[in-house]
Each structure stands twice: as C-alpha cells, then as structure tokens.
Amino acid sequence: MASRSEEDLCCPVCQEVFRDPVVLSCSHSFCKDCLKRWWREKPTPQVEPPLNRALKKLCESFLQERDQRSSEALCSLHSEKLRLFCLDHQQPVFKVEFDQTAEHIKVQARHTERQIKEQFKKLRQFLEEEEEARMAALREEEEQKSQMMKEKMEALSREIAALSHTVRATEDELRAEDVSFLNNYKAAVERVHSDRPGQTPGQPDLQHLEQDEGHGLLQSCGEYTVWILENMVL
C-alpha cells in the first residue's frame, strides 16, 4: 500500500505519480497527457490549462527519492534500508531487528541468571541443613563414646582396687608361717586369677574407642560430598 504522501501526489485518472501536472480553474490537478486524452473524447474545444510547476517539482523530487530507495535493500516490514548483515543467516537485517534480538538476548541472560541463583540458593540451604544434621550426629556419637569410656575407667578402677586388695592379702599370708601359706596356696592362686583385670563383657576397649572416634561420620561425609559433586545439576 502506498504511503499517504504518495497518494497525494497521484493523478486521479491514471493513479500514478503526476507527470507534467496541470491545474484547472477548479484547482484540481491532472497529468497533462491524461487530460488531453480525456479532452479528445469531448467535441468541445478546451483551453490548455497552465502547468503546475510546484507540483511538478514536488513529484520529480518524490520519484527521484523513490528510485534511490528502490536501488537499496529495504526491510519488507519497515521499508527502511538494511544496514546490518547477519553472519549466521548470511543475509542483511534491519537495525530494529538487531536491537530486538540484542534485547531478547539480555532478557534471556537475566532469566538464566535468576535460575542459577535460585538453584544455588536451594543447594546452599540443603548443604547447611545436612551439615547441621551431621554435626548433631557427631556430637551424639561423642557423648555416647565418652560415657562408654567413663564406664570403662570406672570398671578398671574397681579391678585395680580388687587387685590391690589381693596383693595385700597375699603379702600378709607370705609373712605367716610357711605351713599356713602352703595350706592356703591353692585358694590364693584362685583368688588372684579371679581378680585379674579383664574386659567387661559388652564394653569395647579404649584403643578401639580412640581409633573409631568420628571415623564413620568422616567417611560418610566424604562419600556424600562426592555424590553431590557428581549429581549436581544447574
């Protein structure tokens, strides 16, 4: 569709831009050739109207500008010169299209940035909660093993006290008459064997407690960290 300015410069007879426009007394303008053809069909002689020089110059200027534009690549939507060239599609593009594409890229980048931040926010929250749970389990294990160690030390103290009592009793018997000691020898040996310090059933030894302290949690945390790194998806 022609622009409004082009419509104003069109002859009402041929619907083209004026060629040698002439103006009638009624102020209407026509192409000179269009008017002559129409007059030839009329028997009444007519006085040739004057040339509309201002309109002629305006039409010539318009036609010249239109010819220049037609020699350049124009955008089919905006009727503007294509000033940029897209390397990906190997074709010229209009600047507005370039600006719109650039803005779309910015919007897409901001959207992706928000998604990344949201994912890492969730990941940090999850890791903090997991850290708190692991530390609570470690503290509970520490308390349990401390209590077990305390009970073990108390048992050892009782065994040491019993051995001390046995030693004193044996020393007293050694100071007695030889015959009396020999008569009580079997009972003394049995008493010493029964009072020897040993591990209380159900209680781990101290060396095992020391070596096992936190080992299970550390190994579990290490394996869990590797799992997170291998399965983390943005």
Image (spheres, rainbow, N blue to C red):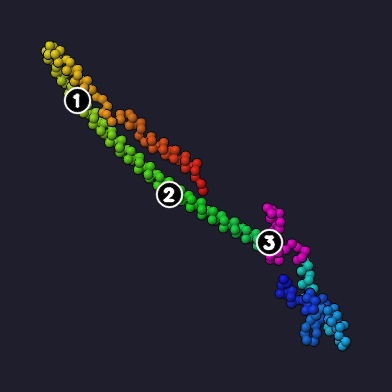
Q: Secondary structure at mark 3?
A: loop
Task: Say above or below: 111 vs 129.
Answer: below
Q: From the viewer's perspective, is 208 left or right of 160?
A: right
Would you say residue 45 sits in the magenta stretch? no
- What residue does disc 2 label? 125
| Main secondary-structure element of the magenta-colored stretch | loop
Residue 189 placement (x, y as % from top left): 19, 17
Badge 1 is on which residue?
A: 162
Report the residue that reaches farthest toward the top.
179
Residue 60 percent across, percent down from the top left = 80, 73
Q: Amino acid at mark 1?
A: Ala
Q: Which of the two labelled residues, at mark 1 and mark 2, occupies the earlier sequence position?
A: 2
Q: Quadrant of residue 2?
A: bottom right
- Per the model, the C-alpha gap separating discs 3 and 2 is 47 Å
Segment colored magenta: 69-94
Q: Which residue is at a point 40% across and 44% down the rendered structure image?
A: 131
Q: Was residue 83 drawn as part of the magenta stretch in this picture? A: yes
User: What numbered label is drawn on residue 48?
Assistant: none
Ranked by sequence position, the earlier of labels 1 and 3 is 3
Categorize mark 1 by other alpha carbons within 10 Å: few (<14), some (14-19), many (20+): some
Instruction: Check disc 2: other Cα within 10 Å, few if <14, some if 14-19, many if 20+.
Output: few
Alpha-carbon span between mark 1 and mark 2: 56 Å
Tag 3 residue = 94
Q: Is residue 18 above or below residue 184?
A: below
